[in-house]
Amino acid sequence: MRECGNWKFHIPSGAGRILDTLHEAGFEAYIVGGCVRDCILGRTPTDWDITTSASPQKMKQLFRKTVDTGIQHGTVTVLMPDGQYEVTTYRVDGEYLDGRHPEEVTFTASLTEDLKRRDFTINAMAYSEETGVIDEFDGIGDIRRKMIRAVGNADRRFSEDALRIMRALRFSAQLDYSIEEKTREAITRFAPRLSLVSAERIRTELEKTICSDHPERLRDAYMLGLTKYFLPEFDVCMSCAQNNPHHRYTVGEHILHAMQAVRADKVLRLTMLLHDIGKPSCKTTDAEGIDHFHGHVNKSAEMAGRILKRLRYDNATIDTVVRLVSCHDMYMENTESAVRFGMVRVGPELFLPLMEVKLADGAAQSSYRIGMKRRQVDTWIRLYREIIRRGDCLDLKHLAVTGKDLIAAGVPRGPELGTVLKRMLQDVLQEPSHNEKTYLMNRYVLRENL
Ligand code: ATP
Ligand code: MG
């Protein structure tokens, strides 16, 4: 472990050896970017990037195992026994013509030039044991001030690469930092350039934002005029009032509070983000002036599917979130059979996550009947645990009768097989003791065949 000032740099042995090898060969080399920021913050870095004056060709001579990850941009991945490290030659980015990628990069002998091309002051620091922290843009000051500030001219930095807009939002949510004024103004000005950023890159940053400790920072993205480029449905929610005893917030504010009230898990946070997204289009106001949102559950589920597809989410994530959204208002009687039917509807593996969704939804509503809503969820969870403990049959796989049994008893092959099995399952969900071959065959096959 290496110490510098009050900060501890637990540089992994592989990264340390890379630095030493480069130094011994007469080159400059530093750890740089996010890992320096994280060490100063006392957080554990997710990856350790290295920047060096050595050319990619030189690196390939110095290290036995390398991969040409982005050799034209000067990046070589060095494989070490404890992991892999990206090592990049000091570089200057050329003209950005597409609002996202430099046309060309040129290598430089100057660390300062390399730090200048980085996005924010907190991400533009380098460290080596010999030099300590190199901080040319007062990244440490901005950490103290809790500020996201662009390196150099903010307008230029966002016009070069619009992804930096999403990164500013994401870092402000992860670190709970504000965005410095000039940087904020530039973000607002260049927000329309977000349409140049691929859906995948937007998704990554949006997900990091809503899975951070401060998902409510999405409010800032709305105020800065960013959400309208990647989640315009949310803008509509921010201006949709809910005059209803269950609610105290607009739909948008309710969504923000609901995200805060749930665990920082991708599926749960996405579910809370989208659970009421269809409300504005279902709003009606009755004679007493009370707002209603009939049909909003199905509408939200349908919109959630479309939005997640647009953000290029994988099918498994889309399916899980849509199922949770479409069940978020599901009501069950306080009986084991009602809970079994509920478990089948959402999928048994999603029952507990659904309870988390319901608790978060309730916590973000008004205090009206809040205690009752919580007790209700507790009761459902108790019934669920009992069902799981006993191992009740919840699907065709665990039914005491199979398709083969039905064929042997003379039921014709074809859709009727499925119909009979489903009827049996309904019976067993109602009454688990009925999951018994003789009973089921007598009741649903033999008697009908007589
Ligand atoms: P994380 O903790 O999520 O890894 P990070 O800051 O390390 O955050 P990376 O995407 O790993 O982010 O990038 C490493 C470094 O490269 C950043 O700290 C920054 O210096 C620089 N960088 C990354 N993306 C950009 C960009 N779009 N524009 C300018 N510099 C960037
Ligand atoms: Mg990183």
Image (cartoon, rainbow, N blue to C red):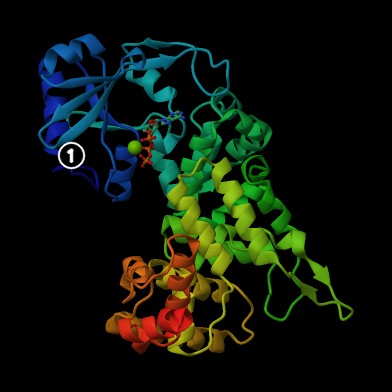
Q: Quadrant of residue 13?
A: top left
Residue placed most toward the observer, 216 or 129: 216
Task: Name the spot of residue 46 as percent of width and height, x first.
Answer: 29, 43
Badge 1 local density, few (<14 within 10 Å), some, or many (20+)? some
Local SS, label 1: loop
The answer to whether 281 appears left or right of 47 in the picture is right
Q: Quadrant of residue 19?
A: top left
Residue at horizontal 22 percent and vertical 19 percent from the top? 28
Task: Name the spot of residue 212 as percent of width and height, x first.
Answer: 44, 54
Q: How many labels, in total?
A: 1
The quadrant of the rendered image in which ligand 1 is seen is: top left
Residue at horizontal 60 percent and vertical 25 percent from the top? 159
Q: Is residue 397 visible?
A: yes
Please identify the quadrant where the N terminus is shown: top left
Identity, as a three-letter code, of the amino acid under mark 1: Ile
Residue position marked by numbered label 1 in the rendering: 11
Task: Name the spot of residue 142 as percent of width and height, x first.
Answer: 45, 42
Vertical comparison of 99 with 187: above or below: above
Residue placed most toward the observer, 326 or 25: 326
Q: Is residue 149 visible?
A: no
The answer to whether 46 appears left or right of 160 in the picture is left
Q: Quadrant of residue 199?
A: top right
